[in-house]
Amino acid sequence: MLRVVGAILLVAVYIYCIIDVLRTPGGEARTLPKWLWVVLVIFVPIVGSVLWLILGRVWRAPGAFSNRRRGPVAPDDDPAFLKKLGDDAWSQRMRRRRSNPSADGPAPS
């Protein structure tokens, strides 16, 4: 029974390491190029996986998600929303100017 659990654990670590190497951006792999890590982890399963976890993987602090892009928290932090507000205000001014041209001042001569 213990052998089965050990084998399942090794297969799980092996699969995790393959997926982790493939998902890691190329510039973040340490010690060796990413393609070499992929070859090492796939063809030398246990040793390659352990070496990847120790030497190749970049360990981030808990809560630091540099890969995840987060959008703006509030509408006033969103450049697209602010641009839309500016465009809407400009459109409204132009509509008002077209409907009442004398309210803007003297006509250019």
Image (cartoon, grey):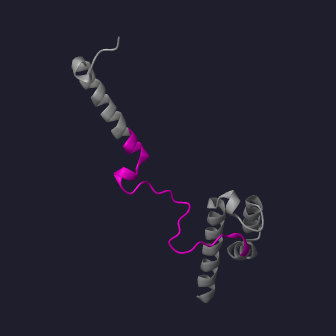
Q: Please identify the quarter of the rendering in which residue 39 is found.
A: bottom right
Which secondary structure dominates the residues rendered in magenta? loop
Residue for point 62% across, 60% down: 23
Residue for point 27% across, 30% down: 92
Residue for point 64% across, 61% down: 24
Whole-percent x, y for residue 52 in the image? 71, 71
Height in image: 74 above or below 50? above
Whole-percent x, y for residue 58 in the image? 65, 70
Image quadrant occupied by the C terminus: top left
Q: Please identify the quarter of the rendering in which residue 108 is found.
A: top left
Whole-percent x, y for residue 69 in the image? 50, 56
Q: Residue furthest top?
A: 109
Nearer to us in this view, 90 or 42: 90
Nearer to us in this view, 1 or 14: 14
Is residue 74 inside the magenta stretch?
A: yes
Nearer to us in this view, 102 or 75: 102
Image quadrant occupied by the N terminus: bottom right
Is residue 53 inside the magenta stretch?
A: no
Q: Which residues are magenta?
A: 55-83
Nearer to us in this view, 83 or 33: 83
Q: Please identify the quarter of the rendering in which residue 105 is found.
A: top left
Whole-percent x, y for residue 57 in the image? 67, 70
Q: How many marks?
A: 0
Say whether residue 109 is left or right of residue 36.
Answer: left
Say whether residue 22 is left or right of residue 31.
Answer: left
Height in image: 42 above or below 103? below
Height in image: 14 above or below 100? below
Residue for point 26% across, 23% down: 104
